[in-house]
Image (spheres, rainbow, N blue to C red):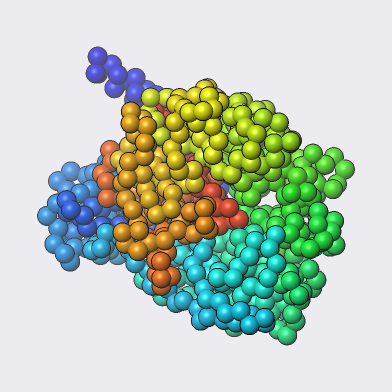
Amino acid sequence: MASSVKTKTAALLALAGLLAIQGAAAAPARQAEKLDRGVVAIRSAEGVFVSWRQLGNESPTLAFNLYRNGVKLNDKPLLATNYLDAKAPLDAQYSVRPVLNGVEAKAGERAVATWLEGFLRVPLRKPADGVNPDGEAYSYVVNDGSAADLDGDGSYELLVKWQPTNAHDNSHKGYTGATLVDAYRLDGTLLWRIDLGKNIRAGAHYTTYLAYDFDGDGRAEVMMKTADGSVDGKGKVIGDAKADYRNGDGFILTGPEYLTVFDGRSGAALATTEYTPPRGEAATWGDAYGNRVDRFLAGVAYLDGARPSAVFARGYYTRAVLAAWDWRDGKLTRRWVFDSDTPGNSASAGQGAHWMATADADGDGRDDIVYGAATIKSDGSLLYSTNLCHGDALHVGKHAPGRAGLQVFMVHESPKCYQGAGAEMHDAATGQVLWKIESTIDVGRGICMDIDAAHPGNECWAAVGGINNPAGGLVNATTGQQISAVRPRAYNFGLWWDGDLLRESLDGTKIEKWNPSGQRLDLLLDGAEHRAGSNNGTKANPVLSADLFGDWREEVVWRTISDDALLVFSTTVPTRHRLPTLMHDTQYRAQVANQNAAYNQPPHPSFFLGEGMTPPPQAPLQLR
């Protein structure tokens, strides 16, 4: 019987590989980062846990040799991408060499030292305090982060947005300090600092920055909205350094707006153009005082199916305008503009969320923009609108593996508009609502991920329902049926952390695992014990979560409560499962780049990653 099962499994794997090859012949290779092996070594109670990357274009049968201080540790080549070294000395350094068809590759990458604290501390240069024109003093706190290979060496640098303590929501008046964006190597070396200046208001909805290799030269650029008085990483002022467009309430409703491309190595401004969509008259966006006009989103999307573009957007409560941009050969060009005011697009008005996801929604090989309850095609036309209106949380991925294509899980804000569907799952290609969680309130948060192995696909829950609401609780993404009237108390982020294929809850500074039999979350790690803090109030998100290095499990980056360092945590739990790095799944990678937009959301890959999953397809990649 065991032999028969193994034979069938081998046949299925061979078929999956054949289908991947056939698909590769039809689809263009997508540009992706040329990453190194990403070796990480972390001291734990059991010894030193070492893990490393399988790249997205490598065979699952590729083997590895692991070296400690230049001495090979394994007798036979390893098929796993993690190893527990129980007898490691404190000064242990590790390197990995791939073995193909029994032949070991020549040594190339440098050995890495062991993290002795169990996490990596990245020192930061905290900005000086400031004073507003009205005499209010403010200081700075670490806010949303990103990761990109800024120098082309195959490993990631970290970016952070510094937010002043007097940052404001768009609906609140008041002056703010300037928003700053820094880039750091993992050893704490500050590469550059960009100061957006007095004419970019600080707050969750004003600045999204995209760090990505847009031109394919092997090094990431950084794109964001700028204004007169913004200062690049080399100290050069953009526009008029003396201009001050702040009104008496601290809003900025006049003056030019720009979009700037910065060099990832130096922070130097490479190109600046007028920001699209333009502000125009503030009142045309829904109010005259500056709330709705300055709601911004941005994301990375492979609009042609092969190379990344940037999409910058404005507005989602009423009018919504999105502009797609290409950075190629030193030139910034606009690909298309979508406007809900254009005839034929009116169904998209008022449908935006506090975050936008990019994914191949309709399965044509090109990325679309899931702008909340409306989806914009890769060519800048309207694909559909569910007409369920605005919401605060959005998750796009393969939630129901038994269904074709991708699915969108979204929570909604206005009962008059969503008409009972406070949270719902809809088909990403058509907008068809597959199931809903009934509600009559503003459903603030919700999430969808595989936390219970007894049910196929992901599980979803939202800040509605429970024991007193039979329509709520924990819902199976595949069937739409309630699994339990009790739902996890955390809604914000997820993290693949331990040794199985289920995703753990990441909320505040806690990583927790759902216990189906006890119907509770069990604590795995609390970063607060190491002085970690979360961001953005009740959103309680980290600076960043992503598969930054090591095997396919994800890392979490928190700030210290004193805002003087980043704390990078990576798992030390062995796993028998082997997957390519999630950062070579371009949907996941783009969603990581988009993570810092407005109400941060966790990234989801283009394939189902959970209990009972099939091997992910090997998409054709062009590593640059």
Percent across and percent down for residue 388 are 71, 36
Is residue 174 something one can see in this rendering?
Answer: yes
Q: Identify which residue is drawn at 59% across, 44% down.
A: 444
Q: Nearer the viewer, residue 529 or 506?
A: 529
Residue ranking furthest to the front:
468
- In the rendered view of the protein, which quadrant contains the N terminus? top left
Q: Identify which residue is drawn at 61% across, 46% down.
A: 392
Task: Say which quarter of the image contains residue 456.
Answer: top left
Q: Nearer the viewer, residue 28 or 255?
A: 255
Is residue 100 something one can see in this rendering?
Answer: no
Percent across and percent down for residue 340 are 80, 46
Task: Say which quarter of the image contains residue 240.
Answer: bottom right
Using the image, determine if residue 8 lies above or below residue 297.
Answer: above
Q: Identify which residue is drawn at 50% across, 78% down.
A: 127
- Left or right of 132, for residue 87: left
Percent across and percent down for residue 405 are 58, 31
Residue ranking furthest to the right:
343
Using the image, determine if residue 347 lies above or below residue 538.
Answer: above
Residue ranking furthest to the top:
1
Q: Identify which residue is drawn at 87% across, 43% down.
A: 343
Residue ranking furthest to the left:
87
